[in-house]
Image: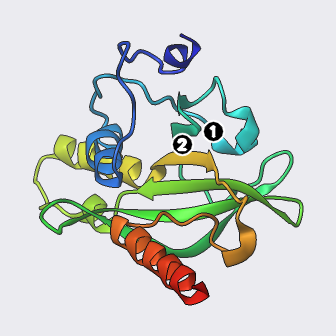
Amino acid sequence: MAENANNNGLPPGFRFYPTDEELVVHFLQRKAALLPCHPDVIPDLDLYHYDPWDLDGKALAEGKQWYFYSRRSANKVTENGYWKPIGMEEPVVSGGNRRVGLKRYLMFFAGEAKTNWMMEEYRLPDSSATSGSSSSSRSSRSTRSRSRMDHSKWVICRVYESDSSDDDDGNGSIELSCLDEVFLSLDDLDEISLLN
C-alpha cells in the first residue's frame, strides 16, 4: 500500500519503468516544448538543493529509483557533496536509429569519497534546439526563441543507489545472459568430472 503512495498519481497496479527513449521522447521533449504531459507524474526539482538520500518524497519514486526534471546547470554541488560526470555522453536513439537525446552518468561524491549514488541525466541534443526554418512573423520567432531556451535548460534525471556489494570486478554486479550461465555451469561440470 505504501508503494502506491510513492507513485504520485499512477493508478494502482501501474509502475513507472520507462526506457531511455521514452524518458526523452514522451517526457523531456514535451516538457521542453512547454506541452502538457499526461499523466503529469514527474516533478520539477532543483537537484542541487538536495542530497540523493533526501529525494524520497520529493521526486517520483519507483522502487529504488527517483525521477525528476531539473534545470541544466554546471553547478552540481549540494550541501554534503557534489555530482561528478563519469565517462562520455551516450546518444539516446529512437527505434529508427534517430538520435533523440543524450545521456550521461554522474556519481555522487561526499567530500572526496565516492558513494554508491548514481544519476543518469538526459538532455535534448543541441541540434534539435536550433533546427527549424526562419519565419517572417515576429511572434513565431519569439515562440521559437523561448522554445530554444527551454530545450537547452531542461534535463530529466534518474537517481539510484547502485549495488556495490560485489566490488571485485570494479563494475558492481553484472547480469549474465542465459547462455553465459549455461557455459559457466559447463565449466563446473568439467571440474567435477576431473575430480573423478
The residue that appears at 28% across and 27% down in the rendered structure is 36
Residue tagged 1: 46
Q: Are marks 2 and 1 in contact (CB under 8 Å)?
A: yes
The residue that appears at 12% across and 47% down in the rendered structure is 137
Q: Specify few, some or many for label 2: CA neighbours under 10 Å numbering under 14, 14-19, or 20 or more.
A: some
Give the x, y percent position of residue 107: 68, 61
Quarter of the image for residue 130 reads: bottom left
Looking at the rendered structure, the number of numbered marks drawn on it comes to 2
- Label of residue 105 in the image: none
Residue tagged 2: 70
In the image, 2: left or right of 50? Answer: left
User: Does label 2 or label 1 sit earlier along the sequence?
Assistant: 1
The residue closer to the viewer here, 140 or 195, is: 195
What amino acid does circle 1 point to? Asp
The residue closer to the viewer here, 185 or 78, is: 185
Quarter of the image for residue 113 reads: bottom right
